[in-house]
Amino acid sequence: MRRLFLTASAILLAHGAAQGARPAPDDGLQAGAAVRDITPRPDMLPMERPPKVQITGFHDPVHVRVIALAQGGRKALIVSTETGKGPYAPQFIAALSRHTGIPADSIFYTATHSHAVPEITAPVNLAHRTDGSETHTERWGQMVMANMLDAAGVALRSLRPATICIGYGQSFINVNRLTDYRRKDAQGNWVPARNLGFNPTGVSDKTLAAIRISGEDGKPIAMIIHHALHGTVMHANTLDHGKTAISADVPGVVSSALEREYPGAVAMWLSGAAGDQNPIVQNDFYWRDPQTGEFVEHFAGDAYLLDYLGAIQARDAQQALAAVRPVEGRPELAVDYIRSAIPGSNGGDYRVNLRMLRVGPIALMGFSGELFTQLGLDIKKASRLPDTLVVNHVWGEVGEMTGYHADDAAKALGGFGTDGRYQPGHIAQALSGMAQTMLAESEMWELAGDGVAVHRGDGHVVLTGPDGRPGTQDDDAIVNPAGKVLRRGVTTFKDAQGRHYVALGRGLRLYAGEDGRLGTGDDVVRGFGRYRQEAGGEMEPLDWRILDMSGDRLTLIAAAIVDAVPFDPADRSNGWESSNLRNWLNSRGGRDAKGDRRGFLRLAFDARERAMMVPNEMPASAQGFIAFNKLDAAQPWGRQTTPSPAPRDLVTVLSGEELFRYFGPSRIATQRELGHDPANYTNAYFRPTRWGIAQGLKANIGHNGASFVGYGDAWTRSPGAQASDGHAYGTFLGSTGSLNIGRSVASPYGALPVISVKIGR
């Protein structure tokens, strides 16, 4: 189990002023909010959303909404888009974090799951191009990103003292959609069948929760409406001459109605555990033919259905808002994140995550995928807090499971969305247990961001470590990507921007990496050296991950693939000693893909930095490594070896053995789901920089699964094979973590530098 703790005062959910509630003091809750239109322009259409629905026109606008919150010097964002599951969370959260300075782990990112909006479910190139090569999706992505960043900035600039309230009502526009039918089998016999439909006796939660944040004047700053409903009234509508017109669906209608009622306020709609909940009527009609039992589906073009159901839920929301009660005093705030696993149906592990956002007695439990309603009810029942709301589509990491997740009873009956790749008997207990654990720990520790926790009793500060839990054996340690402890008993400090770091010596600082937590193996040393990273070639500070610490020596690997470089442009040898790549890295005459011979060492480091560098000393290994040899059709998977010891250069790249040693075998569940043995794959995944892509590097676009989107290929120093055709082939690290033989050494593949630095005097 791997867990992510955030600051206990970091993310504050919206609740607002009601009679008897006092505005927050200066160190209390502050809130601001903003909404921006992200409806695609006509020149951005047509676009597509799964499953191959062509979107060609418009019915009603779609928006991004941002609520900014702050308390005690800490800030956070809640971001919701009126889309299905995107835009692609890892990419957009990273941009929000860079733009606002708010850590990625303090951004609560979700979507309304509206089904008549285009989707961005994978990384997309958002760099503006004038050569006409931009796709409609890329142009829309640029628009969404710009408006999302603008809304975040406005929300932060409008922060002001606020109070919080929560209330409940009911909304009866949802219904369980898994229906029992009968159909005829091949012999003409009637047999049971279960599919999409209308099941008024099935499990369904009609509860509608309303959270309100108000300013000192009692007027609402923001509202949150929470209900278990699929945004599918307008799914596959035929309003645009038989094709689909864009619509934010019921969530958008409700939010817009409340914003008209309360000018200046932002109304955000959150999806509850709605994996098996549809609107009571929608444009996508389906049933079983009573004569044959065959499944029938019909798509209509009637917008009045949306107007009707939207008006009903807007009224329901108003009634719940009228019944809100204040959260008295200063609420204790906590955010937590648990990564865990349950037995998979294929015998491996199946990843399950749960996020918690707590404000005093109110807790939001966010799940990355689509929980069925019963699972949401199970979590709520097990919670020690009555005001627990389960939210679907809350994600932020590559590899999170975003599909349907059915409870055991629904899984046993079968039907749409019940074929999740996990064994029954585990998921409800796992989710409820994670919720209880987070709630209990939030009362003992205040989480200060960046993987740092402060004990509420004696005030001592700890790094929570790979398990994310304060007070355990892995606290206060630096670990490498494979999980090896490199140093214990470290102390954290804060920089001028409020970010936690570990001082390594000689001015080097270790910060949290992509996962937002120090002490997890994802940490980065920031700012040692500079290199071209953007497409235009601008020199920017480099980030490095720690592979090893020995005495006062640090061994570091670049956090991204820095450039495209042929191993041997002459296509003669796959040996490292005389390779072009080795010479380019050490500025000894080698050239990059475009012919530049200045080399990495000369370009990236100044004289002071070069004086801190020492030759790399890689331990010898006789174990070899597993690689896929494309040239050996009979036995492609086999053990390879690298000559050792490695030459003692200031800059090198890792061998196949070293990639397994420093990163370990793959921990991405998709490997096993694709039929791969994770033991044959490393857990080394690196993205090329925009500069690298501009020089010819490729990024995975998802043909191996969404878990690998955005990662690239990079050379190792291990030899590959010499083919009978006279060509030399090198060994490279692939975007799925595999080591591969089968690409010509003349190919411009990724350069992933490794350096050693002395941090002692």
Image (cartoon, rainbow, N blue to C red):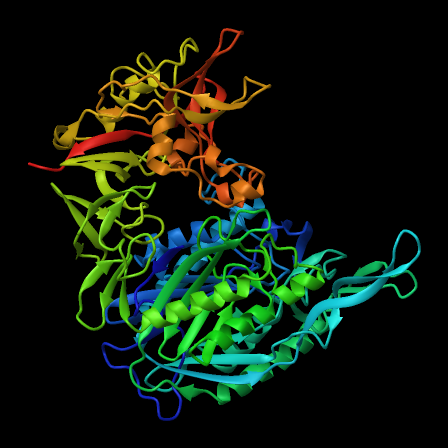
Query: How many callouts does the rendering have?
Result: 0
Out of 284 and 134, give the one closest to the viewer.
284
Q: Quadrant of the N terminus?
A: bottom left
The extreme bottom residue here reads 20
Name the spot of residue 504 as percent of width and height, x first: 16, 44
Residue at image point 45% right, 23% down: 639
In the displayed structure, 105 sits above or below 678; it is below
The image quadrant that residue 188 belongs to is bottom right
The extreme left residue here reads 761
Name the spot of residue 152 as percent of width and height, x first: 38, 62
The image quadrant that residue 333 belongs to is bottom left
Instruction: Indicate left or right for 13 with 323 as reference.
Output: left
Name the spot of residue 760 as percent of width and height, x first: 9, 37
Q: Is residue 158 visible?
A: no
Residue at image point 21% right, 24% down: 650
Out of 720 and 9, give the one closest to the viewer.
720
Instruction: Indicate left or right for 492 with 631 as reference.
Output: left
Instruction: Indicate left or right for 460 with 754 as reference.
Output: left
In the displayed structure, 579 sits above or below 665; it is above
Residue at image point 29% right, 54% down: 465
Q: Is residue 612 visible?
A: yes
The image quadrant that residue 240 belongs to is bottom right
Name the spot of residue 702 as percent of width and height, x first: 55, 41
Q: Quadrant of the C terminus?
A: top left
In the displayed structure, 365 sits above or below 186; it is below
Out of 312 and 669, give the one closest to the viewer.
669
